[in-house]
Amino acid sequence: MAKTEKKRPLVGIIMGSKSDLEHMDPARELLRDFGVPFETRIVSAHRTPDWLFEYAETAEKRGLEVIIAGAGGAAHLPGMTAAKTLVPVLGVPIPATVLNGQDALMSIVQMPKGVPVGTLAIGKPGAANAAILATEIIGNRHPEFRETLRKWRAARTREVMAARDPDR
Ligand code: RP5
């Protein structure tokens, strides 16, 4: 277990099934790179609804500042989590069915007015962006993470600039 998973977590990563893990791994990798303390839990909205409620209801008290929730299919995990906490929830649609994540995207993005879920792109790019966005959000209270992001972005810019002429 990495150092960032031993400290008191600021970000909670949850997902509906262990089978979602491969799609959510980019979020975990980035949070580790940023040094953001986080935890990962499998929480199924339809198979473990009581555990979901417990997780969401205790999130604030436990110090979580953002929850990233990945789910496939009907994908009600992010919305139900958001319904039970005021900690901001970022939803990642997982390509888990023959609809390749379009189902999960429509479900997560179409939260009715009043209980928002910030919805990211389908699959790994969405998971990565959820981690970056979560770090931006916690950067409001923990400026050190904002500085980490500033450096990370500058490094991405340098990478592209260094490769800007593929014929060189
Ligand atoms: C959803 O159903 C999960 O988020 C997962 O994406 C999908 C399939 O789950 P498993 O049948 O692989 O456990 O609840």
Image (tube, helix red, strand yellow):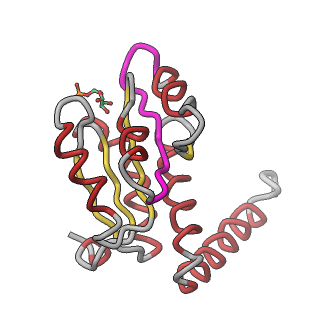
In the image, taking residue 52 as reference, residue 160 lies left or right, namely right
Q: Quadrant of the N terminus?
A: bottom left
The answer to whether residue 34 is above or below residue 103 is below
Q: Quadrant of the C terminus?
A: bottom right
The answer to whether residue 41 is above or below residue 17 is below
Near-viewer residue (98 or 74): 74
The span shown in magenta is 87-100
Q: Position of residue 33 (x, y in %)?
A: 44, 71
Q: Position of residue 96 (x, y in %)?
A: 36, 25
Q: Quadrant of residue 6?
A: bottom left
The answer to whether residue 55 is above or below residue 44 is below
Q: Residue at x 56, y 67 (%)?
A: 137
Magenta stretch: includes residue 95:
yes
Q: Quadrant of residue 70?
A: top left
Query: Farthest residue in the top direction?
Result: 98
Q: Position of residue 38 (x, y in %)?
A: 33, 67
Q: Position of residue 139 (x, y in %)?
A: 56, 76
> Tag count in the figure?
0
Query: Farthest residue in the bottom direction?
Result: 144
Query: Farthest residue in the front direction?
Result: 114
Q: Residue at x 51, y 53 (%)?
A: 130
Magenta stretch: includes residue 59:
no
For ligand 1, which image quadrant applies?
Answer: top left
Q: Residue at x 21, y 52 (%)?
A: 54
Q: Quadrant of residue 22?
A: top left
Near-viewer residue (34 or 168): 34
Q: Residue at x 41, y 41 (%)?
A: 78
